[in-house]
């Protein structure tokens, strides 16, 4: 597998300048994503979500993003104008956020939102857009797509809303999908259904997936490769099926601090954070 | 030995007519003194509503809640014996009160003496120390806030702690610290826990027995040992168990 990566990131920084001080949320990280499922794992404040947003150049002031290189299959994303970047968002790189309640437009029917996506990106006729929207809702296993198309975001459950989001994001046929905690707001049983759908679509379409999550175990069972982030840095990169070979004490700590069924009642191992990890 | 806390055929109904929601349906369970009992289920299963009904925060439409064999007392007398820790430590502490003031309030309400000592002791017990006494909640991390909420619950030296998803809003490593703290306090003080969680692994770690709930009703009663051996009878409990093991390709 020596093909060129889909996304190449080099020396990425995200800084927030305030009057008092500068907070460095992401500190000079680099990685590549191929047509694979890459997991980015870390706890709150590790910079994992900021990394996802920075790829889309969605860091709002006072935040600022710099990088040596941000390349999407030959396109230099850093050199694009804001207008050029808008053409990349949604069409070549799509993003799924944690809570569909906030990501869907609350006052527009779901069907119209889906159709609009297609008309903007693919420029197809209304009838064709509707046909494709219905097909896409079926692909994410929504049983009564006609009814869902007529409904509003608040009328569907969390799991259903997240499927609608996935349908909407995949409609334009992006090359890369960034999913930021896509199932964290869902019940466990629904979580797995949504993951299964995402897994299948990503594989069938040969897309790259960046899966951002706090849940190391879930990521390990779902992804091919895992980056572990701590304090804005990547502290370890691992093959997902070799998680037990993790060397960094932070990764090991994250793995062992979760209670396990049948793990007994002994106190859970806790993480002793060392200043050196953040260096 | 009789149960310290017992719930018999509990029903909770919200609203009327078309808006009527039967949130808890004929749920019964008992927790012996010093025991730890878990309620597990997904959102909308009614698990948190059971806790809220015990404290009088949800309307009881039928059934009984007994404390030491007698109907639960109300108001101050109840608060002395049963305390609750909520899910979101960001929402359950007054944002403009210092930790000292948060902790002084129950002492004043209940007319307990030696407030200074009690506050210092409570902060020590939850591993915070007196350095945190005059800080505001926004100066604390999520885990530290949850420790304050636990300290506040323990100030009145209750017998029962109702824990409503006490670690769901916390990072995994912080969750481990708070769970360890809760387990230690229970052993030291002989507390009785009723723990609500969506996370089967957390309940298995913390409780000896548990009740799986779905759509407001009890689905299956389990011993932690049975759970560990994957000996479950209902399809729903099996689904939850499988889901807790992560994604399978």
Image (spheres, coloured by chain):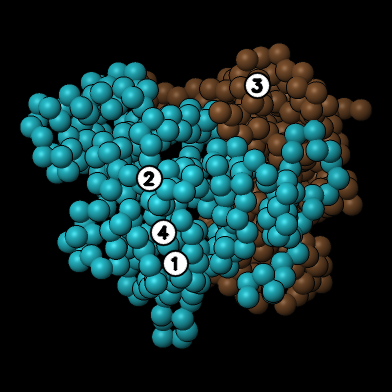
Chain colours: A cyan, B brown
Rendered position, A193 above or below A177:
above
Q: Which residue is mark 1?
A: A10
Residue A57 on image: x %, y % = 32, 63
For label 4, the SS is strand
Q: Which residue is mark 3?
A: B237
Please say if the residues under marks 1 and 3 sit with CB atoms less than 8 Å apart: no
Same chain check for tags 3 and 2:
no
Disc 1 or disc 3, which is closer to the eye? 1
C-alpha separation, residue under disc 4 versus residue under disc 3:
44 Å
For label 1, the SS is strand
Q: Residue at x 9, y 26 (%)?
A: A127
First-in-chain label (2 vs 4): 4
User: Which residue is outermost to the front?
Assistant: A2
The C terminus of chain A appears in which quarter of the rendering?
bottom right
C-alpha separation, residue under disc 1 versus residue under disc 2:
19 Å
Rendered position, B135 above or below B88:
below
Label 4 resides on the chain identified as A
């Amino acid at each position: 597998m020596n093909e060129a990566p889909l996304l190449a990131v080099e020396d990425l920084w995200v800084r927030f300048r305030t009057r008092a001080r500068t907070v460095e949320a992401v500190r000079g990280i680099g990685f590549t994503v191929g047509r694979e499922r890459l997991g980015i794992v870390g706890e709150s404040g590790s910079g994992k979500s900021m990394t996802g947003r920075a790829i889309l150049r969605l860091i709002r002031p006072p935040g600022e993003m710099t990088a040596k290189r941000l390349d999407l299959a030959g396109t230099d994303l850093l050199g694009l104008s804001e207008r050029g970047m808008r053409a990349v968002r949604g069409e070549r790189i799509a993003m799924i956020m944690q809570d569909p309640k906030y990501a869907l437009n609350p006052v527009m029917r779901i069907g119209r939102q889906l159709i609009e996506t297609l008309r903007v990106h693919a420029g197809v006729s209304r009838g064709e857009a509707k046909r494709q929207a219905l097909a896409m809702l079926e692909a994410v296993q929504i049983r009564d797509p006609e009814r869902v198309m007529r409904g509003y975001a608040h009328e569907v459950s969390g799991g259903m809303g997240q499927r609608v989001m996935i349908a909407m994001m995949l409609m334009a046929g992006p090359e890369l999908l960034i999913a930021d905690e896509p199932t964290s707001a869902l019940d466990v049983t629904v979580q797995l259904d949504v993951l299964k759908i995402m897994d299948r679509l990503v594989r069938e379409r040969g897309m790259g997936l960046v899966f951002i999550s706090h849940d190391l175990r879930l990521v390990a069972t779902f992804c091919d490769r895992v980056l572990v982030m701590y304090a804005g840095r990547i502290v370890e990169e691992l093959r997902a099926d070799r998680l037990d070979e993790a060397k960094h004490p932070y990764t090991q700590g994250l793995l062992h601090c979760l209670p396990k069924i049948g793990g007994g009642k002994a106190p859970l191992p806790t993480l002793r954070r060392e200043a050196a990890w953040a260096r | 030995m009789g149960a310290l806390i017992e719930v018999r055929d509990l029903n909770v109904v919200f609203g009327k007519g078309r808006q009527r929601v039967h949130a808890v349906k004929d749920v019964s369970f008992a927790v012996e003194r010093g025991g730890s009992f878990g309620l597990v289920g997904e959102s909308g299963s009614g698990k948190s509503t059971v806790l809220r009904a015990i404290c009088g925060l949800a309307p009881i439409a039928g059934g009984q809640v007994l404390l030491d064999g007698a109907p639960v007392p109300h108001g101050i007398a109840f608060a002395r014996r049963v305390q609750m820790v909520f899910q979101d430590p960001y929402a359950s502490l007054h944002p403009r009160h210092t930790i000292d003031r948060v902790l002084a309030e129950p002492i004043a309400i209940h007319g307990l003496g030696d407030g200074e000592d009690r506050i210092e002791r409570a902060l020590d017990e939850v591993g915070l120390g007196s350095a945190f006494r005059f800080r505001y909640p926004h100066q604390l991390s999520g885990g530290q806030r949850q420790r304050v909420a636990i300290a506040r619950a323990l100030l009145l030296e209750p017998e029962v702690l109702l824990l409503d998803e006490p670690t769901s809003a916390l990072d995994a490593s912080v969750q481990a610290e708070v769970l360890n703290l809760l387990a230690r306090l229970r052993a030291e003080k002989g507390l009785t826990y009723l723990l609500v969680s969506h996370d089967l692994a957390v309940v298995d770690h913390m409780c000896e027995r548990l009740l799986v709930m779905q759509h407001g009703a009890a689905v299956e009663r389990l011993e932690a040992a049975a759970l560990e051996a994957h000996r479950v009878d209902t399809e729903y409990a099996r689904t939850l168990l499988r889901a807790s093991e992560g994604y399978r390709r």
